[in-house]
């Protein structure tokens, strides 16, 4: 039997903490009533929220250790194969959302959507083998860091947008009561589109940093490879829907679905393109 | 003025974006055979739309951050077009010891407005090494070059991977295409001596196909070369591709005759003598020229800063919406 990769126990512990945060977040959103049938006030709900934040932060810390252990084992960061990319994205998305969760209490209800989305990545990473990855020479470029950083902020902001969109949509179902303590749909809609504009800024910065990296890494700042083309289409789509929202009175539900489309598009770009192209970028080796 | 508002409409914007998306998908993968017009037409449409929108739409021209962003987008379209019209790309193989010669460029592509001067490029190729990790995965490339200065001095540089050799707006990048080169001497029967090189196929990509052909002067018979290399090639471990740890036997086939030559040995032909003088290496370079790179960078950064400025100016409203004072659902 081959030895267990050193980062795996930390990864599992991180996902366990995330799982506890997920259960607590969803359970905490259900309205609770006392023996007289009166709704229990916010004070008790705060216990759940504090526990969720604690577990989320613990998950981030444990994932940091997992990434660090793997980094030390392989001698390079989590930038190449799917296993480490998933670890890295779970880490950054969780970290960003932890900040939003702490900073904007009125939006904590989005955890009901955000955590399951994180678990898509969490489940995926659990079925992958932690094989070592080869670090191409062109990845030593400093602009890679900028590209990755901006991309993570973009994806995280999109995820928050998805959370807000999900609340808007779920309020039209039987799950309405879950979100009784959150701002109304119009307010959520305004916040959602602000997050998408924020996402557009970092999406643009990601493309710029990526182009600078590509110029010296692969000899040309834009080659219309699979990843670049998909990223550009994603940026164009985000710009188009922002224009739609700013100019027309699109229904809230339509806006919500459009925003979800941004994250799905980005997800398919980031995680789907490697299945189409043998290399993340043309000429990566 | 009606046409101004018509061209500024969001319908034109969305149509242009859709056309640009289609053009992008048709262009994906690079040399697809589709005309560049699949991108030029939608970009031109969006540029006209943007000019009209900036001129007529107060939501854009009265908000400085948003205006800066859209002006930057417009500028980018123009600058990218100028860049493509004035660009140059080519490939080059440089043998160790060889000085750059613009006539050696292959696969040359240049825009109609290209005004660069290839004589700016003046360097000679030195030795290089390439590190390989287990599984023949190419690691860092370090190519030594000597850059000839105007004062006659030679500056030694090491380039490779993402460290290009730069001459003005020309950038030369090492490529995965590299290999071994035979230095041969031909002494014809009339006493004239010619020294030349024959580049073998890329290595280690073509490990067992290190072949080439040549026809001696004054002969109609093709000489086939095959290089039997000894490079400490190791698929399972770390390996360094270097001239220092490489040697080769040159196997020459002429008709039914097969001869093996070590370095320094020679073979007699009817019209002269061929001597296997030396084994060296060649490095493949990609040359890229685009005078607009810096402009593209600064324009795009300023554009994004404009967008950030616009968002920041509305930050108070964002925070108010998310505060406890907001109406709950």
Image (cartoon, coloured by chain):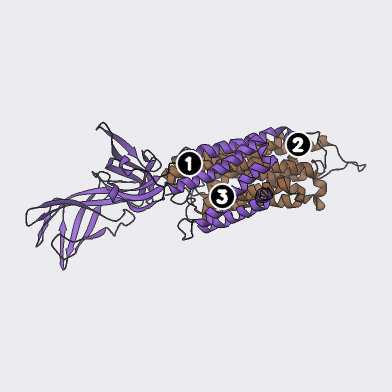
Chain colours: A brown, B purple
Chain letter of disc 1? A
| Res A91 visible | no
Quarter of the view holding residue B208: bottom left
- Which residue corresponds to mark 1? A212
Chain letter of disc 3? A
Residue A232: give its label.
3
- Which residue corresponds to mark 2? B322
Say whether residue A197 is left or right of residue B276: right
| Res B102 visible | yes
Identify the residue at image location x=59%, y=56%: B19
Residue B236: x and y in percent read: 36, 51
Q: CA distance from mark 2 to mark 3?
A: 31 Å
Say whether residue B255 is left or right of residue A118: left
Identify the residue at image location x=27%, y=46%: B101
Identify the residue at image location x=72%, y=47%: A247
* Front-most of residues A204 and A143: A204
Instruction: Please tell me whether mark 1 or mark 2 is closer to you in this view.
Output: 1
Determine the residue located farthest toward the top in the rendered image. Answer: B151
Residue B286: x and y in percent read: 36, 48
Query: For the residue labelled by badge 1, is the local secondary structure a helix, a strand or a loop?
Result: helix
Residue B4: x and y in percent read: 66, 48
**Vertical relation: A37 (above or below) A174:** above
């Amino acid at each position: 039997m081959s030895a267990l990769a050193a980062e795996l126990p930390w990864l599992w512990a991180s996902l366990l903490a995330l799982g506890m945060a997920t259960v607590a977040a969803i359970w905490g959103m259900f309205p609770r009533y006392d023996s007289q049938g009166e709704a229990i006030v916010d004070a008790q709900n705060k216990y759940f929220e504090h526990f969720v934040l604690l577990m989320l932060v613990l998950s981030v810390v444990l994932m940091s250790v997992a990434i660090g252990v793997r980094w030390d084992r392989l001698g390079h960061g989590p930038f190449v194969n799917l296993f480490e990319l998933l670890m890295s994205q779970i880490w950054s998305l969780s970290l960003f959302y932890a900040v939003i969760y702490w900073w904007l209490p009125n939006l904590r209800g989005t955890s009901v959507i955000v955590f399951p989305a994180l678990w898509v990545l969490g489940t995926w990473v659990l079925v992958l083998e932690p094989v070592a990855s080869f670090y191409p020479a062109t990845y030593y470029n400093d602009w890679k860091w900028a590209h990755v950083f901006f991309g993570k902020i973009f994806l995280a902001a999109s995820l928050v947008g998805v959370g807000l969109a999900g609340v808007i949509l779920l309020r039209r179902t039987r799950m309405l009561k879950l979100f009784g303590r959150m701002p109304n749909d119009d307010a959520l809609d305004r916040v959602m589109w602000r997050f998408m504009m924020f996402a557009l800024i970092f999406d643009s910065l990601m493309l710029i940093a990526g182009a600078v990296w590509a110029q010296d890494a692969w000899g040309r700042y834009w080659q219309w490879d699979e990843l670049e083309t998909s990223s550009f289409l994603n940026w164009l789509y985000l710009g188009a829907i922002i224009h739609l929202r700013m100019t027309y009175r699109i229904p809230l539900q339509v806006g919500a679905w459009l925003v979800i489309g941004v994250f799905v598009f980005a997800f398919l770009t980031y995680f789907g393109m490697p299945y189409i192209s043998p290399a993340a970028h043309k000429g990566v080796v | 003025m009606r046409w101004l508002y018509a061209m500024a409409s969001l319908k034109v914007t969305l149509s242009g974006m859709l056309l640009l998306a289609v053009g992008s998908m048709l262009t994906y993968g690079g040399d697809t055979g589709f005309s560049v017009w699949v991108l030029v037409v939608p970009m031109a449409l969006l540029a006209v739309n943007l000019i009209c929108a900036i001129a007529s739409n107060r939501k854009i021209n009265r908000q400085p951050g948003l205006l800066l962003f859209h002006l930057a987008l417009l500028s980018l379209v123009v600058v990218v077009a100028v860049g493509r019209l004035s660009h140059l790309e080519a490939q080059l193989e440089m043998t160790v010891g060889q000085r750059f010669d613009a006539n050696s460029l292959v696969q040359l592509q240049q825009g109609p407005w290209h005004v660069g001067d290839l004589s700016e490029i003046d360097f000679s190729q030195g030795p290089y090494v390439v590190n390989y990790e287990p599984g023949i995965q190419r690691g860092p490339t370090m190519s030594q070059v000597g850059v000839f200065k105007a004062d006659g001095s030679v500056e030694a540089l090491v380039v490779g991977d993402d460290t290009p050799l730069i001459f003005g707006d020309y950038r030369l990048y090492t490529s995965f295409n590299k290999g071994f080169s035979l230095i041969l001497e031909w002494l014809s029967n009339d006493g004239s001596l010619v020294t030349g090189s024959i580049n073998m196929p890329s290595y280690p990509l073509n490990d067992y196909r290190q072949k080439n052909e040549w026809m001696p002067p004054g002969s109609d018979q093709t000489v086939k070369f095959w290089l039997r290399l000894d490079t400490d090639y190791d698929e399972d471990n770390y390996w360094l591709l270097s001239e220092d740890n490489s040697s080769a036997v040159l196997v020459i086939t002429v008709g039914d005759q097969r001869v093996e030559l070590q370095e320094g040995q020679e073979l007699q032909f009817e019209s002269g003598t061929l001597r296997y003088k030396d084994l060296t290496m060649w490095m493949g370079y990609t040359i890229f020229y685009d005078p607009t790179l810096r402009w593209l960078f600064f324009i795009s950064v300023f554009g994004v800063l404009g967008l950030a400025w616009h968002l920041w100016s509305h930050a108070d409203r964002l925070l108010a919406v998310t505060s406890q004072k907001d109406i709950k659902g």
